[in-house]
Amino acid sequence: MTVPGCQLYLISPLDVAGAFPERLIRAIEAGPVAAFQFRIKDVDEHAAVKLAEPLMEICAARDVAFIVNDSISLAKRLGADGVHLGQNDGDVADARARLGRDAQIGVAAMDSRHLAMEAGEAGADYVSFGAFFPSQTKVTSHAADLDLLRWWSGLFELPVVAIGGITPANCVPLVAAGADFLATCHAVWSGDEARAVAEFAQAIAMGSALRGEASA
């Protein structure tokens, strides 16, 4: 995952069977996508591998990082590009030891500056803050704000992901405030994924221009 300005970070819906691989191709090819997070629940690891493998191939062929949500063991079994860890999903040191030095390890810091700094000191490759808006994907009791993004991007070089209810209509201020990645799920998969990604690209360009003006 590289960071030339802000980029899109897709999160999978819980159902990735059936025609979903074709939808993923449409989404990725509609505009620049930096990463795809494989996030499913209540599926054993063997079944998860079968679901993940074709999606990994799609991402690899299009230079999109394939990140596994929560599970270090699944990420290792798949040979994924990395893992995204919640606060109860293991630590950075264990993930690094098991996945290798080149793995992309992200840590959810929610709305906590302290957790984000701890993750950075432990060697995470990125941190995520959120939720910035009410989420259609998961219930969360943590609310992040623009000041958190401004603070982080002003002090640290470690990339930051904004997450939680993000849409093309509300993301411009997040980009302008310093988000390196926008993580999104429902806004893309609830309708025409190609159109949504194209709309995100336009909004990201607008936010990047505002960020450039602010730093000039």
Image (spheres, grey):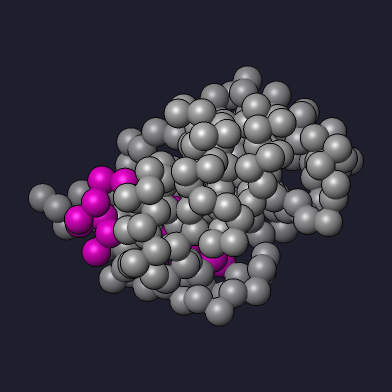
- Which SS type dominates the magenta stretch? loop
Q: Point out the stretch of residues depicted in magenta.
A: 151-170
Task: Specify whether residue 166 is in view.
Answer: no
Q: Is residue 162 magenta?
A: yes
* Residue beneath the point at 71% across and 39% down: 74
Residue 46 falls left or right of residue 60? right
Residue 113 falls left or right of residue 17? left
Q: Quadrant of residue 80?
A: top right
Residue 151, above or below 69: below
* Residue beneath the point at 32% across and 50% down: 121
Viewport quadrant of the N terminus: top left
Observer-nearest of 149 and 101 = 101
Residue 57's spot in the image, x, y percent?
A: 70, 24
Residue 216's spot in the image, x, y percent?
A: 10, 50
Residue 50, above or below 12: above
Observer-nearest of 120 and 63 = 120
Q: Quadrant of residue 16?
A: top right
